[in-house]
Image (tube, grey):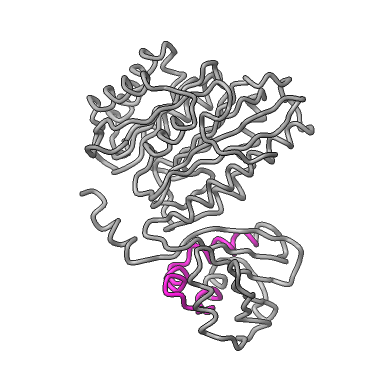
Amino acid sequence: MKIIDGGVTSAKGFKAAGCAAGVKYENRPDMAMIFSEKPCRAAGTFTSNVFKAAPVLWDRRIIREGDGSVRAVVVNTGIANAGTGKEGMRLCEETAKKAAGVLGISPDEVIIGSTGVIGPQLNMEAIFRGIETLSGQLSDTREAAKEASIAIMTTDTHPKECAVEFEAGGKKITLGGMAKGSGMIHPNMCTMLSYLTTDLCISKELLQEALSDVITDTFNMISVDGDTSTNDTLVLMANGEAGNEEITDHGTDYEAFREALHHVALDLARQLAGDGEGATKLLTCHVINAEDVNKARILAKSVITSSLTKAAMYGNDANFGRILCAMGYSGAEFDPEKLDIHFDAEGFSRITVYSDGDRVLFSEEEATELLKQKEVIITADMKEGDAQATAWGCDLTHEYVNINADYRS
């Protein structure tokens, strides 16, 4: 596998565009489009929130109930089209029909994504205007992928992209993607908004299996604020343009694809976690030597989602009591008398703060300097088995409150 500079246009046959349509804000990119020259097999995972936005219901129907053929994605920011009732579903249909008309495809081949404020109805004049503009700007260039990734941002501070190349069936395969998400991030069998494209030829069943499998230890192990969005959508499109023999079983080619998919998903997930609203640093929690992987996941996620731990990390305070507390209420059973807690950061020696049921004397000054780094790693050694899991998040700052106190205005 080779990491390359790219995004959703890296794979053969995919084009993209981004534009400022004025959906909610003026003079900022707020709509994006992805288009495949050939029909794609599509897989997806969606929010587990009972309150699902209209685009989620639209996309889920197409991917789960349709024939598997998808050609285009249309995404808007600013308005989430959530809490909009039957009218919201009607607007999804109108969006798909408009896109289908200008692209020469079927409305059931159009995936729709929306993100932003919950409640208001979409400004369809702006949506239609954006679709017309985007269809005329579609390109397979690197710049087009970047513009699309910028256009799906809301409170994100930077676009998030990743692409790789690997080999399957003697052919070079490319997989690329983009994602957005900064607040209301706490996936559960889903993600924020993320769109992945590949020129691999693979059965729809295995495409979905690989995606559902990979998110378990990538997107589903990140959290910014503990809120699972109403609009979370992850769609993977495969158009077969690479020309490999179709993957229909769990052989070497499938494993190569799964490895590449895991890399892209993990890279995007880490980018999302590190760009949480108001965040100053990425927090990584490794739980090692646990009894089983499920317990390790529960413990790691509990540390990452703890508001007190996140606040301590913002203050560069090596308050390991916050971590112990978060692990203790996680619901996972373990022996506190066997637990070790360590802090790590690139360029710093490891600092052990807790071992075998007791605090360890350490330099508060050195710990403070370590915790000021852009990525802080918390390692919890359970000393009870050989299972492990990792979760990613960010610190909790004053700016998070400022952003969300006036989000609608």
- Segment tinted magenta in the rendering: 296-324
State the count of labels: 0
Our reading of the magenta stretch's main secondary structure is: helix
Residue 231's spot in the image, x, y percent?
Answer: 40, 40
In the foreground, 330 or 324 = 324
In the rendered structure, does residue 156 fall within the stretch colored magenta?
Answer: no
On the picture, is 245 further left or further right than 164?
Answer: right
On the picture, is 235 further left or further right than 103?
Answer: right
In the foreground, 297 or 194 = 194
**Where 183 falls versus 162 (above or below)?**
below
Q: Quadrant of the N terminus?
A: top right
The residue depicted at 44 percent of the width and 65 percent of the height is 395
Residue 64's spot in the image, x, y percent?
Answer: 53, 27
**Where 338 falls versus 260 (above or below)?**
below
**Where 357 falls versus 196 (above or below)?**
below
On the picture, is 402 further left or further right than 347?
Answer: left
Residue 235's spot in the image, x, y percent?
Answer: 51, 33
Q: Residue furthest bottom?
A: 361
In the rendered structure, does residue 310 fall within the stretch colored magenta?
Answer: yes
The residue depicted at 71 percent of the width and 21 percent of the height is 244
**Where 74 falls versus 371 (above or below)?**
above
Image quarter of residue 79: top left
Q: Residue furthest top?
A: 104
Image quarter of residue 129: top left
The residue depicted at 31 percent of the width and 22 percent of the height is 133
Residue 226's spot in the image, x, y percent?
Answer: 44, 57
